[in-house]
Image (cartoon, rainbow, N blue to C red):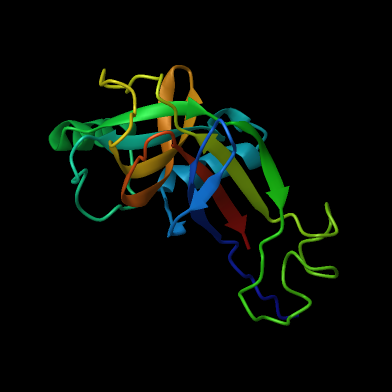
Amino acid sequence: MNIADKACTAIGFVTPSFVDVKTGEKVPFKVRHNTLSYMSAEAMAAAFGGDPSYIPSKIGFVYGESGSGPSGEISRTQTWDMFMDELSDSGSDVQIVSFSYSPSLGGEKPASGSSDSSSPGHEGGDYTNIKPTGSNAITFHAVSNSQTAGYRGSAAFKMDDYAYQAVLLGYHERKYYVLSRVSLDDAQKPDGFEIALDWTIVFR
């Protein structure tokens, strides 16, 4: 018997928007691809073994007053202490918020123009055991605010500040774990708007 063992991979992307929290108006800007840390694999392994302590629970917005935040390529090697050192070196801070509402389970949407009916997210696709529309993707939702101070003591993420990056965080026994990180391309926060993130992790 020939057995083909294929790896199960995870990828992620972030859909950011400027949102007027009073009216609900949303102005999307460029979708960003994240970098999953090595810690994210550990969190998934722990969850498969019955320990959900390290699953994503918060999102952090990395921000500052200048147009230049943490520099360098985002790598898979991510620890909270390393992250704090980067913020200190760049003079930036992180506003940590809880999810706006419960994560959304769904199917990965096929590439634009695809007619493959077996693609995840379609009737009859591979990932339809839980939901007929697919269930191999989980999306976390969060919105910045102008009230919560930065973790390092800076004033809250306010109008005209720049959003440099975002981090998807686990939190266990009063310790944060960096599960994923993404660049927000130094987006500047407009008057009357917050930044909303839909952060999707896809398992294949």
* Camera-nearest residue between 56 and 101: 101
Question: Where is residue 136 drawn, in percent x and y?
Answer: 69, 56
Question: Where is residue 84 drawn, in percent x and y?
Answer: 25, 31
* Residue 40 is at least partly visible in this image: yes
The residue under the point 62% across, 38% down is 47
Horizontal side, residue 129 vs residue 22: left or right: right
Whether 58 is drawn above or below 76: the answer is above
The residue under the point 33% across, 33% down is 159
Whether 199 is drawn above or below 115: the answer is above
Count the marks: how many?
0
Horizontal side, residue 46 vs residue 34: left or right: right
* Camera-nearest residue between 166 and 75: 166
Question: Where is residue 21 drawn, in percent x and y?
Answer: 54, 32
Question: Where is residue 35 drawn, in percent x and y?
Answer: 40, 54
Question: In the picture, which quadrant includes the N terminus?
Answer: bottom right
Question: In the picture, which quadrant includes the C terminus?
Answer: bottom right
Q: Quadrant of residue 39?
A: top left
The residue under the point 74% across, 54% down is 135
* Residue 45 is at least partly visible in this image: no
Q: Outermost residue toward the left?
A: 89
Whether 106 is drawn above or below 2: the answer is above
The residue under the point 21% across, 43% down is 69
Horizontal side, residue 127 vs residue 47: left or right: right
